[in-house]
Image (cartoon, rainbow, N blue to C red):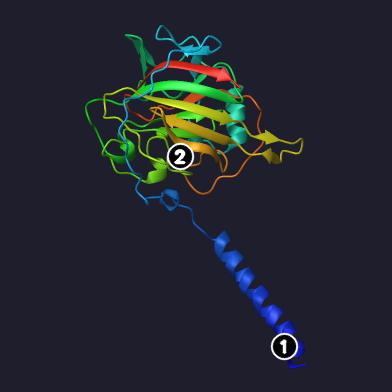
Amino acid sequence: MKIIKILPLFILLISMLLQSACAQDQQIQWQPELTDDWTPVTDSVSTVGHFAAPPSDATILFDGTDLSHWESAPGYFPHMQGVPDYLEALQRDHDPAPWKVEDGVMTVVPGSGNIKTKAGFGDIHLHIEWRTPEEIDGDGQGRGNSGVFLQGLYEIQVLDSWLNPTYSNGQAGAIYKQKAPMVNASRPPGEWQSYDIFFEAPHFDEDGNVIKKAYVTVLHNGILIHHRQQLQGPTVYIGLSHYEAHSRSLPIGLQDHGDLVSFRNIWIREL
Ligand code: MG
C-alpha cells in the first residue's frame, strides 16, 4: 500500500528531473570547439598513393587542361545559414572558376572563393588527387586546408596532416566535425595524394523527411579510412548537424580555405 501511495510523487519527481535536463540541453551555447574531437589520436600508416587513370566509362572532371567543368561557387557550406540558402545560391548565375591551371594542375587562388562542378551528381565514385604546399606555412587547420564537398554539403577534409596535430575529426580524410578517419594515411607536404570516395546520396520523402541517410566510403592513398560511414547530416562548423531535404543530384564543391592546395586527375563514375 505504501508503495502505491508514494508512486505519484515518484513519477512527479522523475518528470521534473527530465524537464530540467531538457532545459539544460536547450541552453547549450554552441562554440566551434565543442565539436572538435581530439582523442583518440589516429594512428599513422605510410603509403605511396593511388594514382589511377580513369576507366573508360568515367566522366572526366579535370584532365589538366582547363576548368570547363567547373564554375565559381558561392561561399562554402559552413558559411551558409543552412541547406535552403545553399540551394538558393545554386540557382544564381556563376562566373568561370577563378582558380589557376598550370602544368596540368589546378591550384586554389586564395581569396577567390570555392568552385563547384557545373553538373550535379548523386551516388558516385569520385577519384581526386591533391597536394598541399611543400613549404610548410601555418599549423593545425591553417596548413594546406581545402575540402571536397560532396553535393556541396558534405565535406571530406583536405589538410596537410603530416606531423600536424589537430582535432582528429578535422584531419585529412575526416568527415569534417563528424568522424575521424580510421588511420592517418597522409603523405608529406608537397607529395601528391589521392582520395577515392564512394558516396551514397541521402533520400527524402515528399514531406522533406530523410528516409535514407547519406553514407560514404573513402580510400586515402588507397587505404580504407571510412567504410560505409553514415553521415549525421551536412557539414556544420558550429553545433550538431541534421538533415534538410535537397535534390538527389547536386554539384561537387572544392574549398578555397586560403591555402595553395592543388588538384589533378579528377574523374567520376555515377553509381
Ligand atoms: Mg576544409
Report whether the residue tagged 2 is closer than 8 Å to ligand 1: yes
Q: Is residue 168 above or below residue 199?
A: below
Seen in the image, is 136 located left or right of residue 6? left
Q: Position of residue 156 (x, y in %)?
A: 46, 33
Seen in the image, is 233 located left or right of residue 193? right
Q: How many marks?
A: 2
Give the quarter of the figure containing the C terminus: top right
- Determine crowd level at label 2: few under 14, some 14-19, many 20+ residues with C-alpha closer than 10 A: many
Instruction: Residue 6: give its label.
Output: 1
Identify residue type, mark 1.
Answer: Ile
Front position in the image: 42 or 141: 42
Q: Within the image, what quadrant is residue 262 found in?
A: top left
What residue sits 42% from the left and 44% below the top?
A: 169
> Is residue 75 at least partly visible in the picture?
no
Instruction: Residue 107: give its label.
Output: none
What residue sits 28% from the left and 35% below the top?
A: 162
Q: Position of residue 260 (x, y in %)?
A: 31, 24
What residue sits 56% from the left and 30% below the top?
A: 199
Q: CA distance from mark 1 to mark 2?
A: 50 Å
What residue sits 49% from the left and 14% below the top?
A: 61
